[in-house]
Image (cartoon, helix red, strand yellow):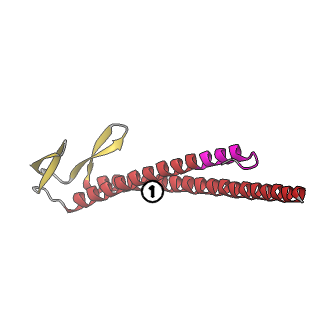
Amino acid sequence: MSLGGGGGAMQELQQQLEALEQEKEAIEAEIQDLQDEQSAIDEAIEAIETLETGSTVQVPLGGGAYVRAEVQDIDEVVVSLGGGYAAEQQQDSAVETLESKKEQLDDEIDELREEVDEVDAESEQLEQQAQQMQQQQMQQMQQQMQQQQDDDE
């Protein structure tokens, strides 16, 4: 809908708003992924703290397949350190490493939430611009209609 020649700018604003909405959705999906990772860490910490040597557990093999296994020594836990590296750690140290990972994820989530706030602020600014444009276009139309009425008289 092109009113008073401002339709191109209005369409551009609409495209920018859509792009910002897509960016916001992508950031929110990333936040959800990080929160899921935190939940997995919580489950791992709980397992480390509650399992005992000799406990029977189900070990995932991949593809939805599991095998039952017996925990030989819960005091030694292999923990991923990132970058494809893992280390065997004492139970308490493993929990500390996992807690540290959770804190890093918290920091990442906070940064992403700040990005969402920035995108929201930018969207709000663009929406205000769009409203101002619409008001200007309406005023121009009213002026044109008034001029036509004056010319017809």
Q: Is residue 68 magenta?
A: no
Q: Residues within 10 Å of mark 1 (few under 14, many from 20)?
A: some
The residue sitting at 73% across, 54% down in the picture is 133
Quarter the C terminus occupies:
bottom right
Q: Main secondary structure of the magenta part?
A: helix
Is residue 149 left or right of 124 when viewed as pictured? right
Query: Could you say which is closer to the camera, residue 53 or residue 41?
Result: 41
Q: Residue at (22%, 58%) from the top-left corner? A: 47
User: In the displayed image of the protein, which residue is found farthest to the top?
Assistant: 84
Dot 1 falls on a residue whose secondary structure is helix
Asked where in the image residue 103 lies, by quadrant, the reply is bottom left
- What residue range appears in magenta? 3-17
The x and y percentages for residue 9 are 70, 45
Front residue (pair 41, 30): 30
Question: Is 93 on the left-hand or right-hand side of 15?
Answer: left
Query: Which residue does the image show at 35% across and 54% down from the upper left?
Result: 36
24 left or right of 121 in image: left
Q: Is residue 139 above or below residue 7?
A: below
Residue 22, compared with residue 42, is above or below; it is above
Q: Quadrant of residue 129?
A: bottom right
Q: Residue at x 46, y 53 (%)?
A: 28
- Residue type of the residue flagged with mark 1: Asp
x and y, in percent, of residue 110 in the image: 51, 56
Residue 90 image offset from top left, x and y in percent? 26, 52
Tell me the residue that label 1 is attached to. 106
Residue 8 in sight in this render: yes
State the residue in front, 92 or 114: 114
Confirm whether the magenta stretch covers residue 10: yes
Q: Position of residue 67 (x, y in %)?
A: 11, 47
Q: Is residue 100 visible?
A: no
Farthest-out residue, front: 153
